[in-house]
Amino acid sequence: MHKNFRIFLATVFAITEINQNPELLPNITLGFRLYDSCYSEVRALEGISWLMTGQEDTVPNYSCHAKSVLAGVIGEAGSGQTIPMARMLGVFKYPQVSYGSVVRYLSNKHLFPSFLRTVPPDNSHALSLAKFLMHFGWTWAGIVASDNDYGLVGALDLKREFSQIGGCIDYLEAVPLQEAAESILHIIDVIKSSTAKVVILYLSMPQVVQLVEAVSVQNVTGKIWIDSTAWTITPIFYRKEVWVTLNGTVGLTFRKGAIPGFREFLYSIHPSTSSDDIFVIPFWEEAFHCKWQSSVDQPMQTWNVISENITFCTGMENLQEVDNSIFDVLNFRLSYSTYNAAYCLAHALHNLQMCVPGRGPFVNGSCANIHTFQPWQLFHYIRNVHFINKVGEEIFFDVNGDSSPIYDIVNWQMYNNGSNRYINVGKVEPNPLKGQTVLINEKAISWGNFREIPPRSVCTEKCIPGFRKAAQQGKQICCYDCIPCSKGKISNQTDASECTSCAEDEWSNDKHDRCVSRIIEFLSYEEPISIILTAISIQLTLLTAIILCIFIKYRDTPIVRANNRELSYVLLFALMLCFTCSLLFIGRPTKITCMLRQVAFGVIFSVCVSSILAKTLTVVIAFNATKPSSKLRKWVGAKVPITIILLCSFLQFFICLAWLLIAPPFLYFNTTTDNQKIIIECNEGVIIFFYLMLGYMGFLAIVSLVVAFLARKLPDSFNEAKFITFSMLVFVTVWLSFIPAYLSTQGKYMVAVEIFAILSSSAGLLCCIFFPKCFIILLRPELNSRENIVGKKKNVV
């Protein structure tokens, strides 16, 4: 009653202001007639019929108004009563301005052509409420709705909007309009069993009262109650237990307006000065719990119970001392929308009155007569009304007859002394880009008994960075598992739907929440193993050069001349190149070094092995040519060794040339071998060429080994076949061991293995073939004489 009375007084106050304003409607006085629908659709239709005809029990479309003209209808708040009213008024194009009905399909101008409202529809409310829920990260909620157009339509709108921005509704329960006790008990069980802490109420007033009373009795705690309507600002809950249960309730309601002078107007109400207001005396008696003498003097049957100890009203009571829960003068919401509705009609009438003939909106620029206008003519003006009210807000209707979707966020706070109050903590307003924007002062909100501020309501806790969401089969999208990102992928935000792959030169850290640069790996000169191998390579190169110098210096001695000194020079020079080419494998690989190093290694080693084969065959030919009638005499000389070296080396050269032309080795950034590293290496291209090169070199080595082994028993002074046999055994052993070692290593260690094989096999050739000769040349010169060689030959023979 108190809320409705205040709404009625807002209409009276607005009309009084309009009539006192000489600029708005000069020479025109607005009046009003009030009809109470009593929350009944039938009575609402009766009231509309009465308003249109001028008296009860009259046929519609027949007016008994003698002087006044029905300008329009303000009302109603309840959607159930508004809809049949709008249907009837729409037939006759009477403007209807609702101050509280929010049902979405009232925006349909085909069904309700003359309906307007000073509150936003529930579809914009649903979007605003969904944005509000997501502001706090509440993605898991339940809905309890009245089983009527308002509750179900609003709840379904919210469910749709909420799901579109990532939220989920755990349950949607309907409260029947009649005999709801059993259903409410079932709903309370659902609320208790649900993991959703947020409960959104789309309830009409009677269902609100029943539910919150039952919630209080059942001691339902740990829930965040979200009001979708204006019941949080309606003083209908008197029991302290209810206050405790709903302490911290948050709601989205119509915007509040500070109507200038309205508060004083409310305080000025008194039975003695408002004798023509039939509601003042009942309100006064209810507010001060007293009885006027005139009420007591009435017949007994006019009131239900008369206490034996009656407190009589004196008229000295002060409305400013009345509890705000009875007479709230701080929250003008429906009163404010009612106030705006009255002014919309007034401004429409003003625009109609100010119309200039010839410039009017109707046929041939005609205007309507302020005293005899038709309903549809006024409707034209009211749907296009646009003005600034006394609060400073812009008032207008959109193409659907709806007002701007602005909502206040209110919080029900209970204090230690038992009092409670509604606090404005923010608002939701339109945004051209985002639809609706939530502006809220979180510090001003009281969350009741929740320890976690703000409380959380999610089906699954957020996935931390480094994890991604994985949907649970058969459940809503808000219920998911958190799966770690796979190797090489990251998620750097909470609740990531997918993990992002790192760039080619990066890798995921241990937590998979950021990409880190990979370590660049190659066999650099700064590494200890590279320093050692480089030092060995240089030393062996210098040692080979020294041996070559020794052989050149002592080139005329028998031991140097005995085994084809030119071949020894070629072999020593080739070994120097072998030791040197190992340096191509050290350092950061480039396109040139990748193409050269294996080819250089293959060709140079082929020269070495073919030189050894030529030396061995020279020994065999030399000894067999000394026999009488030997056919090998014609092969004695320098042509055979040179031919062998050129033939064997050029065949390897052609293999390498084909390799370079068809599929040359290339620079390769290996990111697959080791996740934490980028291995800069040389890809051999078509690997068959690499193994063909090694196979050919191995073939030459085996042939040399076999020939040397067969010639090992020839006289020592003329024969180095034994040394060649040992050198080729070392060579073959090294390269047979190289293959499994090479295949079992990766990265820079694979390169180190190949360098070691090159150095060790080359050093084996150098040591086994030339060290014994150098020993004789330098330390036993007496053995390096023709007499000694010839003497040994005789002994052998």
Image: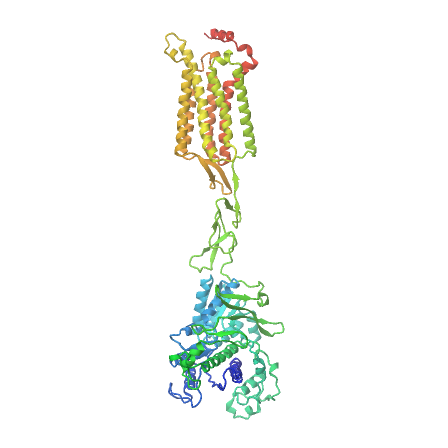
Residue 240 image point, x, y percent: 58, 75
Along the horizontal axis of the image, is 469 left or right of 267? left
Residue 111 image point, x, y percent: 38, 75
Quarter that holds the C terminus: top left
Depth order, front residue of 722/754: 754
Does residue 661 appear in this view?
Answer: yes
Residue 126 image point, x, y percent: 47, 68
Depth order, front residue of 130/216: 130
Q: Residue at x 44, y 62 (%)?
A: 164
Along the horizontal axis of the image, is 461 left or right of 58? right
Along the horizontal axis of the image, is 619 left or right of 543? left
Tell me: residue 459, above or below residue 42.
Answer: above
Q: Residue furthest front?
A: 358
Tell me: residue 403, above or below residue 668.
Answer: below
Q: How is the image coloured?
A: rainbow
Tell me: residue 372, above or below residue 789.
Answer: below
Q: Quadrant of residue 454?
A: bottom right
Tell me: residue 255, above or below residue 285.
Answer: above
Residue 508 image point, x, y percent: 51, 47
Does residue 178 appear in this view?
Answer: no
Q: How many marks?
A: 0
Depth order, front residue of 507/382: 382
